[in-house]
Image (tube, coloured by chain):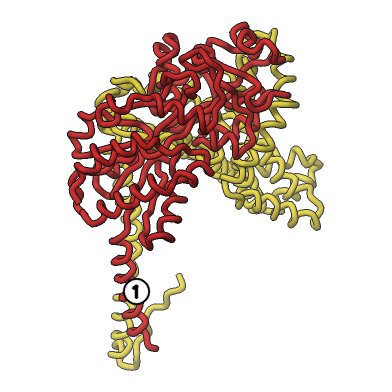
Chain colours: A red, B yellow
Amino acid sequence: MNLKTVLAAGLVAAVSFTAALAKDVSGAGATFPAPIYLKWADAYKKASGSAVNYQGVGSGAGRKQIEARTVTFAGSDIPQTGEWLDKRGLVQWPMVMGGIVPIVNLEGVGASDLVLDGQTLGDIYSGKIKRWNDAALTALNPKAKLPDLPIIVIRRSDGSGTTYNFTYYLSAVNEDFKKKVGTGEAVEWPVGIGGKGNDGVANNVMQTKGSIGYVELAFAIQNGLAYTDMINSAGKRVKPKFESFQAAAQNADWAKADHFNLVLANQPGASAWPMTVATFILMPTESDDAEAAAAALKFFDWAYANGGSMAKDLDYIPMPDSVVSKVKSAVWSQIKK
Amino acid sequence: MTHATPSLDHDGRLSAARSKILARMALGDRSFHLVTRLCAYGVFILLAGIVVSLIMGAWPAIQTFGLEFLVTRRWAPQLDEPILGALAPIYGTLLTSFIAMLIAVPFGLGVAIFLTELCPIPLRRPIRVAVELLAGIPSIIYGMWGFFVLGPFLAQYVEPGIVWAVQDIPVLNIIFGAEMISNISLFNASLVLAIMILPFITAIAVDVFSTVPPVLKESAYGIGCTTWEVVTNVVIPFTRVGLVGGVMLALGRALGETMAVTFIIGNSFKIDGSIFSPGTTISAAIASEFAESADLHRSALMYLGLLLFILTFFVLAAARLMLMRLEKRAGA
């Protein structure tokens, strides 16, 4: 074989490779749902032969990419307003849910041993409560032995949908937190140490005695960290688990939410987990590549129908059927295929 | 000069063949000159391109915040009209680099002096290799080690004692005070930085120390100087230009180091005077926030990058100036 044939063969291979990629669906965005999207994509490829690529680059970066139309769809943990979407010719819908849990590192304290409420958690994160034996904490946990230690607050250093949902909840239930810190993907934290990503926060909490952090439930379970229970809006103590996340979604008023613009924090219901998070898909109504758009919708349809148990395996919560049928009738119909 | 003048033949003329060869050599010289010149100018073009793109990226933030950016302590990207200021990252950058130099320069010079003046010959190679290997460790490894090993160790065994010891001494109880001691602090970051830049200082110091003519040292020893006197009066004065160069290199690395610092500094935009508090540096702030930033926030991060660029430039320029002065004084 001479050099020319090698080059020609390489060129043919390269061309056919890009041709194969072009038919595929690409997505980018939030890191929080990336594990389940990848698992779905893997199973979907086995079932249908079509590939879906998803890159967990962050919600903000995902929104940028869909605005520039460099991907077929974007993932974002933060719902956008109808006005924002219309201006950019995009639609959004919730794809899957999870929950944020407070995690603590205290000697002799295991999962669900402590309980917190929004007021207390907000006061810790705004720097008002500084020690573990603070009266507010001992009042909530009369049985627990809380040490006379400073609370080391761990939070995200990067902008993140997790932080958005966490601060959204704390601002909703704690006036002081709302004034001092507010809601955002990246906020001006008055206290604490910043860790990069969910795993950065989990690692910092694991390493630091007397620390508190917030991560998605999956990260707490994977790392064997002690999460706490919460008092929800109905005043009931709830554990962070599948049922309480599901309850929050069930009670949420999706029907009234314009463009599905709904944050699942602090939903009503006696068993609802207060820091439940829905993660969203953004897609243009008129795609440059209608074929890819159709293929993407096929994938999402398949994931809604078959992805539930896979989601549960990874501690995600599938959307309730009522929401799914509304997504299909109200949103997908707008996308030109 | 090694160039021989072209020899003349019997008739006193250059032979045709010879002048042809000479012409070809001249052409070769010229094209070599051109290529090397292009390479050198290419560096300028690259540098200018980086500066221009940094300024362009930072322009919205420069217009919004102006020079006030330098003295604003708040970093609040979540507000409708974000308030972003560089004071905390600048403070963290300068403080960590300063502490790192404070530790690494004497330490590194000590290693170098031992290696060149005092070390038994069989030990010399292993120690040098070990120091050089230290320079080869990727910075992320230092970050992990600082996070998992050094940080917890300091927080458990070292820092509480210091905090307790200085609690009643004014000023010191602010610098070494801490409301809470965690595995993560400006001091820990400085210590890891010090370890990272140590090999630079040592390697260069060893190299320049070995340029000291033995006759100088031997004369000093001959008139009865101690090793200490030889080092301080002969070796260091003779090599200070090279030493300052090594220290500058190290400072450059300390100012810009990103990964290891991002791991262990705490990424907190606060200035409270204590070196045991979490803080941030310019490069750590950019590394942790850039991916999820947008609009003015992103532009402000570019502005931070521009500041780091300027800061490094001025540090290097100041060091050069110092060097020139030293040389002048040495010449006088």
Residue B8 or residue A6, whichever sits in front: A6
Q: Which quadrant is the N terminus of chain B positioned in?
A: bottom left
Q: Which residue is found at the position 44% from the left and 41% from the top? A: A33
Q: Is residue A65 left or right of residue B139?
A: left
Say above or below: A280 vs A172: below
Residue A106 or residue A237, whichever sits in front: A237
In the rendered image, is residue A229 in sight?
A: yes
Residue B132 or residue B284, whichever sits in front: B284
Chain ID at mark 1: A
Q: Is residue B21 left or right of residue A171?
A: left
Mark 1 burial class by Cα count in 10 Å: few <14, some 14-19, many 20+: few
Residue B78: give x, y in percent of width and height.
36, 23
Residue A320: give x, y in percent of width and height.
39, 35
Secondary element type, mark 1: helix
Total residue callouts: 1
Residue B118: give x, y in percent of width and height.
79, 47
Q: Which residue is mark 1?
A: A13
Q: Which residue is found at the position 43% from the left and 39% from the top? A: A318
Q: Which residue is found at the position 61% from the left and 41% from the top? A: B144
Say above or below: A114 vs B94: above
The amino acid at mark 1 is Ala
Say above or below: B18 vs B272: below
Q: Quadrant of residue A212?
A: top right
Q: Residue furthest bottom?
A: B10
Q: Quadrant of residue A84?
A: top left
